[in-house]
Amino acid sequence: MTDYSTIDFSPLVELSGDEVVTHSFVRDVPLSGGRTLALVTLDNGRDHTRPNTLGPVSLLEFAERMDELKERASRGEIHGVAVTGKPFILAAGADLSKVSEIPSVEAGKRLAQLGHYALGKQAELGVPSFVFINGLALGGGLEIALNADYRTVDASVPAIALPEVFLGLIPGWGGSYLLPNLIGIENALNVIISNPLKNNRTLKGQDTLDLGIADALFPSAAFLENSIRWADGVIAGTTKVSRPNVPGKVERLVKWDAAIGIARKTLESKIGTVAKSPYAALELLRAAKSGTKAEGFEREDDVLSTLIAGDQLQASIYAFNLVQKRAKRPAGTPDKALAKPVTKVGVIGAGLMASQFALLFVRRLRVPVVITDLDQARVDKGLAYIRDEIGALEAKKRISTDEANRLRALVTGTTDKADFADADWVIEAVFEELAVKQDVFAEIEKHISPTAVLATNTSSLSVEKIGLKLEHPERLVGFHFFNPVAVMPLIEVVNAPATDEATLSTAMVIAGKLRKNAVITRDTPGFVVNRILAKLLGEAMHAVDTGTPFEVVDHALDGFGLPMSPFELLELVGLKVGAHVLDTHHAAFPDRFFESDNLHRLAEYGTILERDAKGRIKGFDKGAVKIVAGGTSRMTAEEILRRVEDGLADEIKRMLDDDVVHAAEDIDLCMILGAGWPFQMGGATPYLDRVGASERVFGDTFHHPPVRGVGA
């Protein structure tokens, strides 16, 4: 087994450069019976906007403090050690800026070993060790806690997680071994793999207690005092700790491998096999069912070092920086001071999409929301859906009964457009047809105030044309959500030629209040996401139309690592909607976008894929295969992939030349947040650079130097 104390970590210090060091400050706290607790507080000296992170210098200082405390414990000066963080933050994990600069597999392994060396010292103190999770605990921050003997958690902690696989890594400082052996394999699979891949879902304080990650939960007001009192009881032997989720013999012999097998099949069906980190984590979790902790840590060292030095991490960090930094400062955003106040929202339509809008607006803005439709029956159906969804949130304890009642009271329905008179923000969710949207807005404008903002959720129609019948088109803005509305984090805010700065500013402020990431786009067919998807789906249908079997096309684009195949995506958005989007783009750019009569026929037929009773894909529907039969120019998978890559490179270059968005980074941000483009691929434009499509199409690259990642 590796003796971490014999390793020279000084080369990592030389690489650490301008690391913001998270210091380990120690003070003694008196306990009952004359005992003493050494309390270590992690603090980088910055305000709450800069979370504690763990670079090489920070880890070595932590290790040094643990060695000093071990010495004190051996002399009987202290009887327990507890670690906590500065206000509201334990630690946000490793310093990613430093991880991304690791130059080799050897250096990557040394960083993995340093984490085990430092955090593992909590188990070697000779006295009980505790971590008081007082705030944000992500990645290595949670692994600090897992390496201790006991854990308490603040009830109001906003986010606790092991998000590593989302970033092309694995929990490599103990998490992959310690967590499944603490809370069981099924729970660990959710925390380590499922949650990160579900838009980086995190745990709250109560979740960690329920799972058995934390041993006790206390309210914020006296969290530290209660945690110290609880630790005193544990040290004195008067407080007993029960951990019902720790796996026993039956789980290890029967459930463990079965859970791993199910998880593998689920991963393959949902994300394909391009991304490396989820499968690496899966293997570590499989191996964690047996063997020693030292063996588990060595496995983590080997896997983490390979991933750190690999290309997928570099691509992931590029994508991570887009989401964490660029998304929070959208290019072209007007001054927030220009935004108009929104005290009431009107939703035109009461169908599923409109009802989802109403629910989101009332939950996030906490203002009255009124919905309308052609008749009272439709309105009542929409209201019933909204109230049922509020009830479901209440049943899941995501909102209180009082909050549920307040939300229900804020939502009303009407067939009288006069009820929109005092609405400050009116959004439509009606049929995707230009004349329909024009007439709807022309009608509602007669009833609303002169200052009200109008928003259209069109996915591909011209916002300028939608506003042609308005007296005040300057108040109209595109506000394109993605489905499902509550989950997808992107809104494309479309700045039409007539849209004024106050309207655009209001849209951006509203998007922020809805907790969505907004990207401003020009008014052009498909905006960003649908234009790129129309290119991809159009090429897929063109290949089918000219004689290539569904099966060949289905797997030709596997290398993109997208969350679903072209035909799954078409069925998800709806075949009729997909046909409409392709038609719209063909009409706008007939030389570059295909129309597909077969897709219209498939839309009338109703399906492409054959599914079993549980909705799982079995293959291609025989009727659908007959509909597309007859083409004579079959392509190979390689030819299709090359056509799509070159077509996307050409289209994105045109979009940038036309200033549809401000930079290639905005294209990638839209595709990551709106189309599920995998983090490990680093976005569309880095991928196209790496596979040579950019060079082939326009003799240059989107990025200088190109972003490393899969597809090189």
Image (tube, helix red, strand yellow):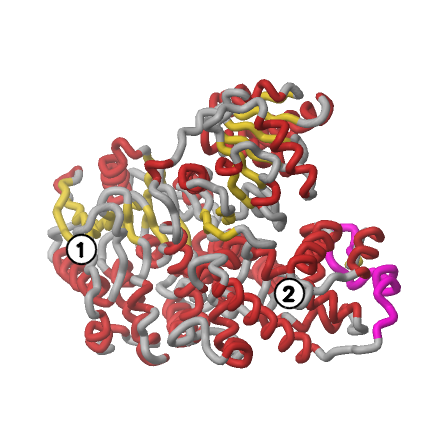
Q: Which residue is the site of mark 1?
A: 24
Residue 574 in percent (x, y) is at 72, 50
Residue 459 in percent (x, y) is at 61, 48
| Residue 86 visible to an observer of this rendering | yes
Quarter of the figure with residue 457: top right
Q: Which residue is the site of mark 2?
A: 536
Quarter of the figure with residue 562: bottom right
- Read off the magenta span: 611-631
Residue sitting at x 74%, y 73%: 552
Task: Mark 2 vs mark 1: give the one in front.
Answer: 2
- Helix, strand or loop for disc 2: helix
Q: Quick check: 234 above or below 566?
A: above
Left/right placement of residue 628 relative to residue 592 reads right
Q: Which of the image's four quarters has the N terminus?
A: bottom left
Residue sitting at x 42%, y 44%: 208
Left/right placement of residue 603 relative to residue 536 reads right
